[in-house]
Image (tube, rainbow, N blue to C red):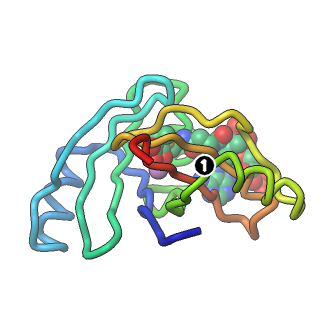
Amino acid sequence: MRKIEHIGIAVKDLKTSNALFKRLLGSEHYKEEEVAGEGVNTSFFQVGETKIELLEASREDSPISKFIEKKSEGIHHIAFDVEDIHAEVLRLKAAGFEILNETPKDGADNKLVVFLHPRSTNGMLVELCQNKNN
Ligand SMILES: CC[C@H](C(=O)O)C(=O)SCCNC(=O)CCNC(=O)[C@H](O)C(C)(C)COP(=O)(O)OP(=O)(O)OC[C@H]1O[C@@H](n2cnc3c(N)ncnc32)[C@H](O)[C@@H]1OP(=O)(O)O
Ligand SMILES: [Co+2]
């Protein structure tokens, strides 16, 4: 793991939360992007070496809707930047972590992503991100 790539935050309404995080961080978001395959609309803020990723449900059955319904808005996952996502999946599997998708899938912000089940990581949803240009 090279660094924390982003902290994912589940929000009900991207427009409202973009304004709140602009007030909080003192800067604008640098992009908005829908990831249809995940059922999310995302918005990214750069904060030094890492990012805040706001996540709004883009459809009824989005994992974000379920999360907000069951818990509330708030921190949804932590994403780590990795050099070689395939090697990391093998390492983490061998280390006993539960991989949700062994084949990396398209994420936002030009990334390939893999998720680990929170029940294998002390209740924290973990995402691995490899830059597609790596
Ligand atoms: C990829 C685009 C973008 C990017 O960065 O590029 C994103 O980050 S997209 C983010 C949205 N996509 C995902 O979250 C994909 C991975 N998530 C999943 O596969 C599911 O959400 C899963 C498996 C984590 C939970 O789904 P499930 O249908 O099982 O929901 P439950 O509510 O029944 O949860 C089971 C169990 O897990 C706990 N849980 C659920 N979500 C989280 C979470 N974000 N953090 C911590 N814990 C979580 C939930 O409370 C249940 O625990 P229990 O003790 O049984 O109550
Ligand atoms: Co993410």
Q: Residue at x 55, y 26 (%)?
A: 61
Please rate how many residues cluster around mark 1, counting C-alpha atoms within 10 Å: few if below 14, some from 14 to 19, many from 20. few
Query: Which quadrant holds residue 17?
Result: bottom left
In percent of width and height, residue 102 lies at 74, 38
Can you identify the residue that label 1 sits on?
Answer: 70
Instruction: Give me the residue at 87% from left, 64% from top.
Output: 95
Q: In terms of depth relative to the viewer, which is nearer, 53 or 129?
A: 129
43 w.r.t. 82: above or below: above
Residue under the point 18% across and 45% down: 15
Q: Nearer the viewer, residue 58 or 91?
A: 91
Could you tell me if residue 67 is visible in this image? yes
Disc 1 within 8 angstroms of ligand 1 (CB): yes
**Residue 91 place in picture, x, y as percent:** 79, 59
For residue 64, say whether it is visible: no
The answer to whether 31 appears left or right of 11 in the picture is: left
**Residue 53's x, y, as percent?**
35, 55
Residue lying at 51% horizontally and 51% vertically, measured from the top left: 129
Q: Is residue 3 above or below residue 53?
A: below
Q: How many marks?
A: 1
Quarter the N terminus occupies: bottom right
Specify whether 126 is left or right of 50.
right
* In the image, residue 30 above or below residue 13: below
The image quadrant that residue 103 belongs to is: top right
At label 1, the amino acid type is: Lys
Looking at the rendered structure, the secondary structure element under dot 1 is helix
Residue 26, quarter of the rendered image: bottom left
- Return the x and y of residue 130 as percentages of the image width and height: 50, 50
Residue 50 located left or right of residue 134: left
Above or below 51: residue 36: above
